[in-house]
Image (cartoon, rainbow, N blue to C red):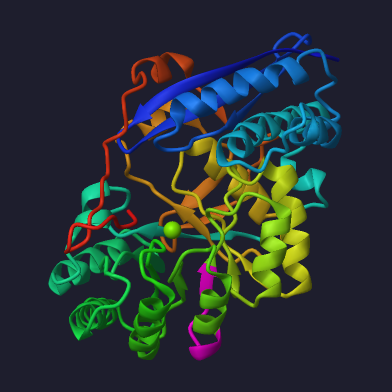
Amino acid sequence: MRITRIESHVCHARMRNWIFVRVLTDQDGLYGWGEATLEWHTRGVVAAIEDLSQLVVGEDPTRVEHIWQMMHRQHFWHGNGIERATAIAGIDLALWDILGKVANLPCSRLWGGPVRDHVRTYCHLGGGNMKEFYETPVENASRFADLAREAVEEGFTAFKSMAVPSTLPIEGLRPIRAAEKAVAAMRDAVGDGIDIMVDCHARPSPAMGLQFAKALEPFGLYFLEEPCWPEAREGLAAIAAAVRTPIATGERVTNLADFRDLFMARSCSICQLDITHCGGLTGARRIAALAEAWRIALAPHNPQGPVSTAASLEFGFSQPSYIICETVHEDVPWRADVVSEGFTVEKKGRVVRPNTRPGLGIEINENEVRKHPFQQEILKRVFLSDGSVGDW
Ligand SMILES: [Mg+2]
């Protein structure tokens, strides 16, 4: 069996351009779907997929590890950069989908069979509405409470919010108090039985991240995400050591060695590897094995499209340390027209029952994808109160 062609199908989904990758074979009707979505880098990833195709076309698609090694190591430059790592992931996911179809088994069964009965999911406040999630001012605590109630009414037992504002490297009490009030309002609104996550988007400096972490500690967050840049490993470690709140990070880390350094620094309790940015399921499985040595939990980053979600769920059914899957369910109203999925979501509790179809269990409707061609993502230029550059 040989790979004959690799296609990229770009589908504009409001905040992101989903990049679906299809790997075709010389066997009639046998192909696999992957995803390589990377917001604000769509053209670069599509071109990187084209570059990688030269290495991969003509190879046996069932030699997934061998092809991963080729994509990661050949042509001199290793595949650690974000665009190349994302392109590798798109192709890798499609190869696992093919292998599952050849074996007539869901991917999780290729890796030893399901390790749990269901996977828990969480949502973003607003369900995927970019404005609600990213642009609700932290000072508007009552809006945070309303959105938290809505998430629970939709069946979720856990949700994530961006209740920490952008700050200069050092600021006084005002932003700290605003974050405290927003989180207090959410806790009051939903009670202790619901898990609340706060994503700092790596905006704070380590010193400000520590202050936010201390201030939010009494509210019993499920986790505090990216309280400072992932590059600031010692800063993360200092925050993690100072509070009992579990610290999560990893969505911007693309390779095994950088995860090793994060873990060795005691930077986090939760690893948020992104399957579409860390070399696909082949890369993710290695990172998961490494995390297990530190007993670090897995909660993959997954705000992307439906193939990323299917891959994250297959991963979740195969990984004992996996705790929860990030989902956005209302980013675009036509999500269900573009994809058919093999798993089922229970509305009450928003838990997912296993995929029963081979591979990743998804089918992409190309006619629907064509209705949503590439559009430039909305530019996000962030400047702080004094005009200096901030992180988005
Ligand atoms: Mg995040």
Could you tell me residue 387's position as x and y percent? 18, 57
Whether residue 306 is in magenta: the answer is no
Q: Is residue 277 left or right of residue 208?
A: right
**Does residue 354 appear in the picture of this structure?**
no
Q: Nearest the camera: 267 or 373?
A: 267
Q: Residue at x 35, y 78 (%)?
A: 208
| Residue closer to the observer: 150 or 94 | 94
Image side of residue 228 versus residue 165, left or right: right
Which image quadrant for residue 290? bottom right
State the residue in front, 88 or 354: 88
The image quadrant where one finds the N terminus is top right
Q: Residue 232 location in percent, x, y? A: 53, 68
Please state which of residues 352 and 285 is positioned toward the viewer in this rendering: 285
Residue 15 percent across, percent down from the top left = 32, 38
Q: Is residue 13 left or right of residue 327?
A: left
Residue 85, image x, y percentages = 63, 39
- Against 391, residue 143 (above or below) is below
Residue 21, compared with residue 170, is above or below; it is above
Question: In the figure, 16 relative to 200: above or below?
Answer: above
Up the image or down, 342 lies above or below 43; here it is below
- Magenta part of the chain: 241-248
Is residue 144 visible in the rendered image? The answer is: yes
**Quadrant location of ligand 1?**
bottom left
Query: Is residue 245 rendered magenta in the image?
Result: yes
Residue drawn at (27%, 44%) of the image:
380
Q: Report the number of discs.
A: 0
The image quarter containing residue 73 is top right
Residue 237 location, quadrant: bottom right
Q: Is residue 133 left or right of residue 140?
A: right
